[in-house]
Image (spheres, rainbow, N blue to C red):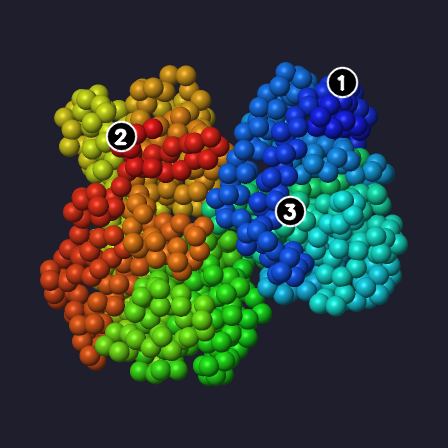
């Protein structure tokens, strides 16, 4: 049973403090405990909160706010200034939460709500500053993964549960500088939903459709802002129609009476909208508390809808989607602070309606994750006939339930593989769409190079941090000049925004090298963009410009093989001279073995598995192999422990190429020690964090190697293990190691950063930043807030290797390009990001172990206040 906790704050201010009435009950039942408490005075919070909002609102990345006159903009904040303001507020809030009166309120809640119970915590207040505070920073939420907070609306009787089909009204407002079609596509992909789009409606059209029809969910995507001191909000329906919500009051009142259960405003500064709807007793509403960048809005909606439609409780789906925004806070400061729920306190948490088959599948999946394989097989044998009978019965009743679709199979059967290839005629990264990019794509498709160049230039000015557009701009200029040289880069775009993030890091490395070649320097491409001078970029390899075809391999091995076969055999791709890819080792192995077949030069910037050394066909790698990373970790352990006393265990993803490679290499190193036996290994998919930790203690291990694959589930479990190790009282002698998959934003996030530091986690990474010229040039390309990572650097190196091979012949073809490298590998060298690119006879990156080259680095996590970052392992704390 879900608990409901309400903090009622009717009066008070930051000068005098806030009297609080705490009420605790069970969902759908009466309150059974009531306590009085107090939030102490803190004028500093008022000052720091306003300072943060001022810095945040002056960021250049905000895109879903209604446009203002540029002449009114007097200050522009840098991301670092915003982070500093947020850190100051966060530090003071944490002290406020530790005040004895606040701590006592937390104790009351903890006495009634266990750490494993579901709990909905509601802050009922009219104070606008309290509504904007990042309440998730309170320690109350730290160890309660099944609890989350919302702001309270007015009490009203609870609404009826959602039923299929879920009727959704998708209001698509003005799309200037943003891409609201992404939101529409996300809604259309929901199972059991009937979506009605309403594009750029007039105020009258919107009122009519709200009044006359019955809707379960309303989703507005576009521009908005709050007004009248946060008591009202404005939505921009079109470029000429921007009504206040108070002017739509009657229509929304009727819509709520007709059954509207949830309103989502995926737009800027929405508390004014929420306050208007709260007065109307809307059951649930989600808004953004501050202006929101387009990519943040899209990522939140994607993650929330996916979780909610898969059976997660509404407020927990919001929590998880909100927490995942931390992954992109290096680009968009404080993104995870933005979404908030405002709801009727009497409203139970809604659930997405499921068919019986859906329930069986979801429960089977949960059973699979928590039980052994044999038990699952028994369940499957028992459930299959039952599921079949149920499906047949439902079909007889008129509800046809399609069989489950295998993602890889559906991809393989696609008859239109060309839609996954683009030189500029398609937009593959949907989260980076805008009207100028769309027009550039259309012009490119018709061969109007001048028009394409102009629109791509405009698109980059709107979003400087878009490598796909920069590649297309280079391509359009190359097509205009003619006699271009073409290569392909495969990226893992797929349906996941996390994969899309990796794809963009890969494309940044390619775009950086391509622009440098075609334009002569990064400064030249910056000048071309700023001053509308594309003629600067008419260079190339032997005066032939480089053209790059982007290919989405879906991060899927089976589909990557089909992509590889197309690249080597399709007559429309015969000009492709080399391929950069693929991202995962497993995907690269499948594509090389079954697709490329030694018919084209393949360089992978990210595949680290030692299994690539044993392929029948050679593939070059600019990233160092797992064996080098593991040797570095082993040498670190040897310095810390007597070799006779090393007792190690490995937590990994059994059967995944990368994880297996790291595990095998580490075991090989340890077996060279006298008296060392086969090390214990624990599959992250089969063991819980507590079970692994118990095994570690039973084995009396003093070394743990975490080698999760790149899946979110395994990475999350590895990070939870880091947190548990940090909480051990006797962890001073325990050495915690991490493979390169642990070198990611989650490890340094607010949730895990302090634990990573306390546990003394040491991570092996192929490359680490050091303020090099490459990094300085990257900031010129992508903006001052951009910090490239090892994926970008290694992809840049891969592109540089291909460019050097192109430079060695006037008439390059596939065979010549391969010969330049494979037949003369000992004499080959290219200028990389921070080290020369050279290969061994096996195709591995030459590793010199020089600190200035930044290859094969060990890093640790170091925190300064609430901010945590990776630093060199041997740097001083």
Please provide percent x and percent y for residue 74: 59, 53
- Compute the Cα span from label 3 to label 2: 51 Å
Helix, strand or loop status at disc 3: loop
Select label 3 or label 1 by which is in front. Answer: 3
Q: Between residues 774 and 387, which one lies in front from this camera angle? A: 774
Please tell me how crowded label 1 is: few (under 14), some (14-19), or many (20+) other residues with Cα within 10 Å: few
How far is mark 3 from mark 1, CA to CA? 32 Å
* Residue at 51 percent of width and 38 percent of height: 84
Quarter of the image containing the C terminus?
top left
* Front tag of 2 and 1: 1
Q: Earlier in the sequence, mark 3 or mark 2?
A: 3
**Which numbered mark, 3 or 2, is in the foreground of this view?**
3
How far apart are the alpha carbons under marks 2 and 1? 54 Å
Q: Which residue is mark 3?
A: 290
The correct choice, above or below, for 516 with respect to 271 in the image is below
Above/below status of 408 relative to 43: below
Quadrant in which the N terminus is drawn: top right
Task: Report the side of 352 relative to 567 (left or right).
Answer: right
Residue positioned 32% across, 23% down in the render: 734
Residue 727's image quarter?
Answer: top left
Instruction: Tell me if residue 216 can be seen.
Output: yes
Horizontal and vertical percent position of residue 393? 70, 54
Q: Are marks 2 and 1 in contact (CB under 8 Å)?
A: no
Q: Secondary structure at mark 2?
A: loop
Point 55% across, 75% down: residue: 439
Question: Badge 1 is on which residue?
Answer: 35
The mark that comes first in sequence, 2 or 1, is 1
Task: Tell which circle, 3 or 1, labels the residue nearer the N-terminal end.
Answer: 1
> Circle 2 is placed at which residue position?
679
**Res 577 quadrant in image:** bottom left
Percent position (x, y) of residue 341?
70, 42
Is the C-beta separation of discs 3 and 2 under 8 Å? no
């Amino acid at each position: 049973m879900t608990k409901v906790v309400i903090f009622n704050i009717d009066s008070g201010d930051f000068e005098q403090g806030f009297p609080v009435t705490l009420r605790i009950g069970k969902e759908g039942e009466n309150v059974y405990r009531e306590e009085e408490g107090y939030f102490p005075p803190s004028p500093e919070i008022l000052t720091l909160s306003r300072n943060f909002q001022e810095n945040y609102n002056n960021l250049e990345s905000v895109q879903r706010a209604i446009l203002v006159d540029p002449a009114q903009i007097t200050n522009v904040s840098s991301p670092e200034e915003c982070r500093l303001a947020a850190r100051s507020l966060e530090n003071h809030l944490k002290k406020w939460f530790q005040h004895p009166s606040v701590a006592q309120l937390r104790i009351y809640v903890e006495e009634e709500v266990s750490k494993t119970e579901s709990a909905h915590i509601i802050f009922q207040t009219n104070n606008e500053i309290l509504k904007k505070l990042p309440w998730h920073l309170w320690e109350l939420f730290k160890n309660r993964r099944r609890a989350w907070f919302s702001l309270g609306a007015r009490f009203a009787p609870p609404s009826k549960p959602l039923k299929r089909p879920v009727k959704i009204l998708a209001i698509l407002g003005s799309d200037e500088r943003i891409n609201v079609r992404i939101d529409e596509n996300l809604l259309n992909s929901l199972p059991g939903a009937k979506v009605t789009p309403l594009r750029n409606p007039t105020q009258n059209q919107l009122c009519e459709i709200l009044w006359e029809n019955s809707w379960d969910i309303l989703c507005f995507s576009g521009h908005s802002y709050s007004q009248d001191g946060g008591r009202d909000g404005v939505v921009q329906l079109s470029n000429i129609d921007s009504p206040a919500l108070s002017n739509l009051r009657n229509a929304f009142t009727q819509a709520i009476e007709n059954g509207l259960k949830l309103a989502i405003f995926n737009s800027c500064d929405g508390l004014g909208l929420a306050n208007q709807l709260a007065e109307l007793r809307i059951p649930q509403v989600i808004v953004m508390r501050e202006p929101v960048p387009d990519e943040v809005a899209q990522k939140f909606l994607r993650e929330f809808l996916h979780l909610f439609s898969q059976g997660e409780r509404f407020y927990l789906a919001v929590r998880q989607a909100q927490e995942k925004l931390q992954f992109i806070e290096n680009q968009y400061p404080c993104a995870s602070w933005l979404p908030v729920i405002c709801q009727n306190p009497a409203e139970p948490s809604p659930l997405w309606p499921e068919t019986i088959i859906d329930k069986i599948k979801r429960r089977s999946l949960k059973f699979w994750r928590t039980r052994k394989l044999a038990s699952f097989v028994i369940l499957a044998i028992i459930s299959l006939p039952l599921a079949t009978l149920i499906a047949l019965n439902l079909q007889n009743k008129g509800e046809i339930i399609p069989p489950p679709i295998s993602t890889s199979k559906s991809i393989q059967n696609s008859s239109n593989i060309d839609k996954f290839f683009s030189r500029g005629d398609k937009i593959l990264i949907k989260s980076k769409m805008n009207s100028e990019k769309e027009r550039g794509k259309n012009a490119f498709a018709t061969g109007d190079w001048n028009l394409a160049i102009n629109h791509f230039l405009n698109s980059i000015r709107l979003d400087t941090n878009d490598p796909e557009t920069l590649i297309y701009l280079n391509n359009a200029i190359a097509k205009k000049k003619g006699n271009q040289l073409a290569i392909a880069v495969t990226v893992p775009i797929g349906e996941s925004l996390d994969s899309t993030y990796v794809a963009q890091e890969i494309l940044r490395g390619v775009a950086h090298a391509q622009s440098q070649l075609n334009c002569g320097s990064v400064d030249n491409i910056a000048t071309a963009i700023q001053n509308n001078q594309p003629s600067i970029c008419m260079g190339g390899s032997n005066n032939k410009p480089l053209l790059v075809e982007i290919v989405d391999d879906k991060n899927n091995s089976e589909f990557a093989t089909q992509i590889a076969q197309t690249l080597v055999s399709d007559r429309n791709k015969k000009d492709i001279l080399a391929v950069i890819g693929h991202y995962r080792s497993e995907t690269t192995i499948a594509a090389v073995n079954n697709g490329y077949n030694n018919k084209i030069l393949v360089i992978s910037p990210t595949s680290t598995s030692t299994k690539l050394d044993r392929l029948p066909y050679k593939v070059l790698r600019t990233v160092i192999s797992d064996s080098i990373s593991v040797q570095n970790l082993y040498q670190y352990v040897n310095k810390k422990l007597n070799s006779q006393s090393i007792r190690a265990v490995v937590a990994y993803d059994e059967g995944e190429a990368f994880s297996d490679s790291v595990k095998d290499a580490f075991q090989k190193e340890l077996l060279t020690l006298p008296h060392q036996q086969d090390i214990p290994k624990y599959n992250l998919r089969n063991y819980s964090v507590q079970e692994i930790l118990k095994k570690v203690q039973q084995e009396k291990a003093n070394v743990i190697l975490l080698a999760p694959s790149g899946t979110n589930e395994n990475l999350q479990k590895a990070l939870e293990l880091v947190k548990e190790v940090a909480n051990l009282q006797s962890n001073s002698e325990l050495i915690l190691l991490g493979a390169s998959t642990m070198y990611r934003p989650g490890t340094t996030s607010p949730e895990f950063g302090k634990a990573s530091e306390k546990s003394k986690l040491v991570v092996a990474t192929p490359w680490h930043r050091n303020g090099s010229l490459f990094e300085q040039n990257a900031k010129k390309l992508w903006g001052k807030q951009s910090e490239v990572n090892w994926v970008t650097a290694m992809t840049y190196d891969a592109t540089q290797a291909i460019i050097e091979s192109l430079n060695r012949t006037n008439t390059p073809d596939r065979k010549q390009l391969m010969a330049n490298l494979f037949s003369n590998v000992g004499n080959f060298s290219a200028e990389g990001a921070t080290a020369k690119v050279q290969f061994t006879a096996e195709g591995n990156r030459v590793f010199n172990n020089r600190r200035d080259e930044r290859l094969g680095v060990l890093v640790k996590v170091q925190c300064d206040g609430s901010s945590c970052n990776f630093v060199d392992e041997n740097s001083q704390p």
